[in-house]
Amino acid sequence: MNLSRNIHAVVFPSDGYYVANCLEVAVVTQGVTLDETLANLREAVSLHLEDEDLAELGLASDPVLSIIMEMELRDAAA
């Protein structure tokens, strides 16, 4: 079995918050700042994976978070 080392998360702004949504595991979190959101994401993923058999989830024993940031492009002249 080929185990993945990456857990991907998409972070995007929504109604005054940043929302982080993991793609491989069922974790969603938010924060007011980007730093807070990433700290919350790290903690939520760690707690979610605690006492889990990572191989059963298709993950290597030392997974890392890979973050994708979605942002709207605004007209620089505006």
Image (cartoon, grey):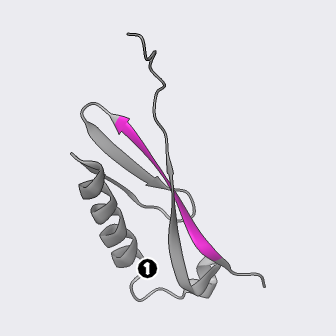
Position of 26 with respect to 24 (left or right) is left
Q: Is residue 44 magenta?
A: no
Label 1 environment density (alpha carbons within 10 Å; few <14, some 14–19, many ≥20): few
Q: Is residue 25 above or below residue 51?
A: above
Magenta stretch: give its range: 5-13
- Where does the image place residue 64, in percent across and percent down from the top left? 51, 75
> Helix, strand or loop at disc 1?
helix
- Where does the image place residue 71, in percent across and percent down from the top left? 46, 34
Position of 35 with respect to 76 (left or right) is left
Residue at the far right in the pictured view: 1
- Where does the image place residue 4, in percent across and percent down from the top left? 66, 76
Dividing the picture into quarters, in which one does residue 49 lie? bottom left
Residue identified by numbered label 1: 49
Residue at the far left in the pictured view: 32
Q: Is residue 56 above or below residue 34?
A: below
SS majority, magenta: strand
**Closest to the observer, 65 or 58:** 65
The total number of labels drawn is 1
Dividing the picture into quarters, in which one does residue 54 lie? bottom right
**Closest to the observer, 42 or 33:** 33
**Which residue is at 36% across, 37% downward?**
13
Q: Is residue 78 above or below residue 37?
A: above
Q: Is residue 7 magenta?
A: yes
Residue at the far front in the pictured view: 77
